[in-house]
Image (cartoon, rainbow, N blue to C red):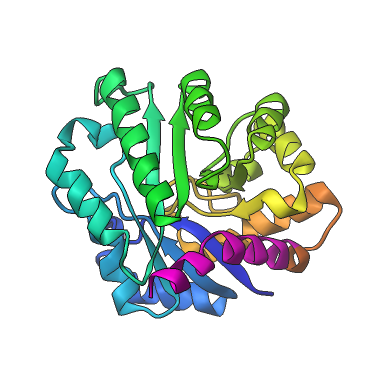
Amino acid sequence: MTLIDSHTHLDDPKFDADREAVVERALAAGVSHMLAVGTGHGPPDLETGIRLAERYPFIYATVGVHPHDASKATEETYRRLEELAGHPKVVAVGEIGLDYHYDFSPREVQREVFARQLEIARGRGLAVVIHTREAWEDTMELVADWGSAPPMILHCFTGDERQAREALDLGCYLAFGGVVTFPNAEAVRAAARITPDDRLLIETDCPYLAPVPHRGKRNEPAFVVEVARRIAAERGSTPGEIGAVTARNFARLCLPGAAGNG
């Protein structure tokens, strides 16, 4: 079984003591590639994902400003993002979007920074990894304005079937993580059941949101196998088939961009 973890935060300090062992466990579990999300702690450091991708041949990277850090963005930030988007291991812009739960940055600033980064992604021909929390309507409005180019991935999808259909109708890909295994997440599982094969991705969002049976522990890429197992059970499939489908989708979305930038 081959799996791709399409969203990791391997730069997180929670991995400082054993990062190499975490990576080795992922490979042993069948995880062939990982996407290192490069938002880190926000500007001016935009290279957290790139540093990991340069160290490991099977890790790719994103660059971007998380909505929490939107108020840190300057014109120099956008110039640097545009430059880093041309790095040969950068395959997406993200995670970017809107977070109205914490409102660490003003909402109007979040929307502006989101739109500016969508523009960079479109110019570079890169996919976009979207974070949305308690901001569904505004997120979908911006997605609709931009259409299906650049291709957009709704990371850690936790919506219901109605929201899934809305996003799918707008051309989005849905990435499911550990939440799909939680006992109270039937709405998320319903969304996973109706997502077409060619729009499905799996992820961990590690070190956050570890799946059952690891819930409450630090999450890591090896645990993406539990996500694949649960989605397979919901869809009447096998973990191997889910791994193959999601690997093809990741390659179609991200790896051609990497080749184009090389």
Q: Residue at x 19, y 30 (%)?
A: 71
In the displayed structure, 56 sits above or below 10; it is below
Tell me residue 214's x, y (percent): 54, 53
Tell me residue 220's x, y (percent): 45, 60
Asked whether residue 167 is drawn in magenta, I would say no
Magenta stretch, overall SS: helix
Quarter in which the C terminus is drawn: bottom left
Asked whether residue 252 is drawn in magenta, I would say yes
Q: Examine the image and state in which quarter residue 13 appears.
A: bottom left
In the displayed structure, 240 sits above or below 106; it is below
Marks counted in the figure total 0
Left or right: 99, with 192 as reference point: left
Left or right: 134, with 199 as reference point: left
Residue 18, visible in the rendered structure:
no
Q: Which residue is drawn at 72% across and 54% down?
A: 198
In the displayed structure, 29 sits above or below 199; it is below
Q: What stretch is highlighted in magenta?
A: 242-262
